Image: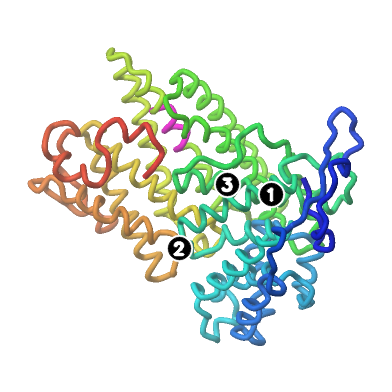
Amino acid sequence: MRHASASEQSEMPRQDEYQSVSRDAANPVVYVPVPRSRQGLSTAGEAGKPQLEIMEQILGSLKQALLRLYFRFIHPNFPVIDRVTSNKALRGDATNLPPTLMCVLYAISLQSWHKSEQLRLHPCPDAHYAWNQAVAAFHEDFKTPSMITVTSGVIDLIGRPSVSLVGNITNCARTVALAQTLGLHRDPSAWLLPDDEKDMRIRLFWGVLINDVWSSIAYGIPPKMAPGSYDTPLLKFGSLSSMCDGNLQEPSSLSYIHLCSLTQILGDALPSVYQLNPDPALIAMEANRLQIGLRDWEIALSGTITSQADEGQNITKPRNLWFSFLFAKLVLRHLLLRATIKGKIGTDSESQSRAACLDQLRTAASDVVDFVSGLSENDLNGFWLPYTSHLLVSATMILLRCIVEGAADKSRSTHVSKLVTLKERLELFRDRYHWDLGDFCLERCSGPIMKFAKAPEQGAYSTEQSGTVPVIDSPLPEAHSGSWIEQDFSSMFDTTDDFWDSWSF
């Protein structure tokens, strides 16, 4: 279904005014124009214009330099803006661009302020104030929504710092609903549209889906778009490069394409993640199937990097993309453990299977922790989805829970040391590099990590030669040995099997 133009709002269409966007008789796609706004609801001027005037007054002559940061550091990694709009913005011809979109572009670009030699000489405007203006414009735009509203919503959702959980959830839901209303979830390849518009619809849909899937697993809520409810094809690199007239960097655009395919794999797992009272056998079967797909994805990514290296490019795995891959592995390992626990039969073989799944899950969580601890300054300055903040908390809490339940062996103290290292590294990233994505993890997990590091009180500590991370020489108590867990950790997370039966950390 497509919205009508503003001039058509006064008259509702008749039932016989259906139109088609496809010549394919076997798979017809029809729509009826409808008014974009509520009948009788007046709007005070162009949505976002007052907010844009405020932001441009604050930025003054620096606004063009700020926009260039968006197209240098964000757009290549998340290309959801069409060629005409991007070229106008880069040329400084933004007078005819939608005010809401401009507000969002200014707000999201502030996170890169320090990367500009020109801008770093000036104090950076208050990012929270800028985002409040952008969000107000976005809400106003929803009174008469259009395709540009979807674009603004997608960019708003990947903005940092991410401070409003409920606001992000509701904005994501509205953006997904509008995208489906405009038909972005359908394959436009055979539609009667210009090629540029087809490509734009495809890339914008994947921006919507990426936000829907990763916000779902980050916030612990079911996605709004179910697998099988869309047939929009995956992006091809040729369409991205041709749409941007050289404004897109090849490695970054390839990273976006790989992120789209990875998102599809994770999205297929979400029904099993959130299904109530599922069939354990079906969960295990689906998780194993998706693990095969994930291995194929890893091989494809490695092949791309090898090919670029052969061409003389100095290419490394994009850090946000690789973090997302490691977390997708963690989700699938969690599913296998959930299936094992749900299908428990009280036999020795079931106990061994549970121990094996728990060990694999602990390894997956540890891989995420190790990866983040090893980030460099250049890595931190790269492109990151804001959902990293919540995903890092989930990985840390899962590893903590695995430590509680796992065997009291030397590996337990090793994983506690890794968590202490993570805490120290996140504090360093925050204090020295102003990396905001570890703040939530420090807030939620610092206390539990240090409790583990100091328990039991009679345990001896030593310092490794390579650093100052405390290493527990005596093992922690067994997970189910009595009051140690109940008294010290039951207030931090569920210490029963119910912890593994839900995705909410």
Tag nearer the camera, 1 or 2 = 1
- Residue 358: quadrant of the picture: top left
Say whether residue 227 is visible: yes
Left or right: 401 as drawn, with respect to 300: left
- Residue 232: quadrant of the picture: top right
**Residue drawn at (65%, 81%) of the image:** 53
**The C terminus lies in quadrant:** top left
Q: Main secondary structure of the magenta part?
A: helix
**First reached walking from the N terminus: tag 2 or tag 3:** 2
Q: Secondary structure at mark 3?
A: helix
Which of 419 and 185 lies nearest the eye of the viewer?
Answer: 185
Render colour scheme: rainbow
- Residue 135: quadrant of the picture: bottom right
Which of 220 and 384 lies nearest the eye of the viewer?
Answer: 220
Q: Secondary structure at mark 2?
A: loop
Which of 144 and 421 lies nearest the eye of the viewer?
Answer: 144
**The N terminus lies in quadrant:** top right
Q: Amino acid at mark 2?
A: Val
Q: Which residues are magenta?
A: 330-337
Tag nearer the camera, 3 or 1 = 1
Q: Residue at label 2?
A: 163
Q: Residues within 10 Å of mark 1 (few under 14, many from 20)?
A: many
Residue 432 - label: none
Reply yes or no: does residue 267 show up in magenta: no
Which of 494 and 354 lies nearest the eye of the viewer?
Answer: 494
Image position of 263 with respect to 92: above or below: above
Q: Amino acid at mark 3?
A: Asp
Q: Residue at label 3?
A: 212
Q: Residue at label 1?
A: 179
Quote the CA–CA distance across marks 2 and 3: 18 Å
**First reached walking from the N terminus: tag 1 or tag 2:** 2
Q: Amino acid at mark 1?
A: Ala
